[in-house]
Image (tube, helix red, strand yellow):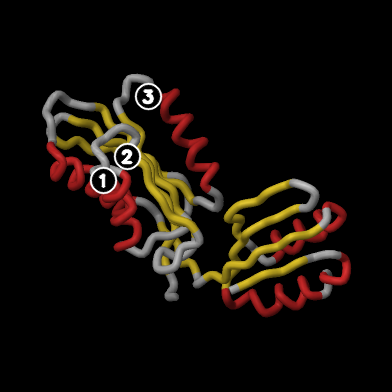
Amino acid sequence: MTDYFAPLNQFQLETEIKRSRFIATLIPLSQVASLHELQAQLRLLHPKANHHCLAYVLGSPQMPSAAGSSDDGEPSGTAGRPMLNILQKRSIGDVGVVVTRYFGGIKLGAGGLIRAYGASVSAALDEMELVVKSKQHLFSLRYPYELETEMQKLMIGFECTMVDEKFSEVVERNLTVSDSSWAKLQLALNELKYRGLELTSD
């Protein structure tokens, strides 16, 4: 796994293709729920838009902990997948993107839609500020609630990225951390195993 790029801040860029408006909004992403929240916000901001298609990559684009896309009503495979392809081809990770489309009256066809959605994301990437991220290590934790304060300190201190979490009788989390920090974090986590922490890693 090699280093990759990630967005520094939220960024938005509008392009026009054959009278259709394509508004690409990209955000740094650590959990998929944040992207769905952005999509919902954009639906409220653009109630007359026809589609709000999305794509995301968590972790490295070469070996993501999660990746996906949605066409949001466009013909299958013509929107979300081309957007995701651009993110992966340009080595962009820890990213979510929503492209809002206003139909301009001219049908683009399947090929035209694929090119348009891809071009919208590509144009935004050309303009936005990106940072280099180091390769990441994926690991899973399961622990009692009494360890939550200490776990939060470790996650913040080692700059872990949340992939997903579940709260039931215990806390369950999937996270990533830079490979360079993994050895030290693993030592710290091992010291908590006697208090009920369960650790699984690749």
Three-letter amino acid code of the residue under disc 1: Gly
Relative to 29, is 76 above or below? above
Q: Is residue 97 left or right of residue 65?
A: left
What is the secondary structure assignment of the residue under circle 3?
Answer: loop
Q: In front here: 117 or 109?
A: 109
Distance Cα–Cα, label 2 vs label 3: 17 Å
User: In front of the other: label 1 or label 3?
Assistant: 1
Q: Earlier in the sequence, mark 1 or mark 3?
A: 3
Mark 2 vs mark 1: which is more N-terminal?
2
How far across and down, in percent of the image, does residue 34 sit? 53, 42
CB under 8 Å between discs 2 and 3: no
Confirm or deny contact between disc 2 and disc 1 (CB under 8 A).
yes
Residue on which disc 1 sits: 77
Q: Secondary structure at mark 2?
A: loop
Residue at (50% x, 71% y) in the render:
134
Instruction: Inspect the image, locate mark 3, and give the three-letter code of the amino acid beneath it.
Output: His
Between the residue at mark 2 and the residue at mark 1, the CA separation in whole angstroms equals: 7 Å
Depth check, mark 2 against mark 3: the one in front is: 2
Position of residue 115 in the picture relative to residue 187 (left or right): left
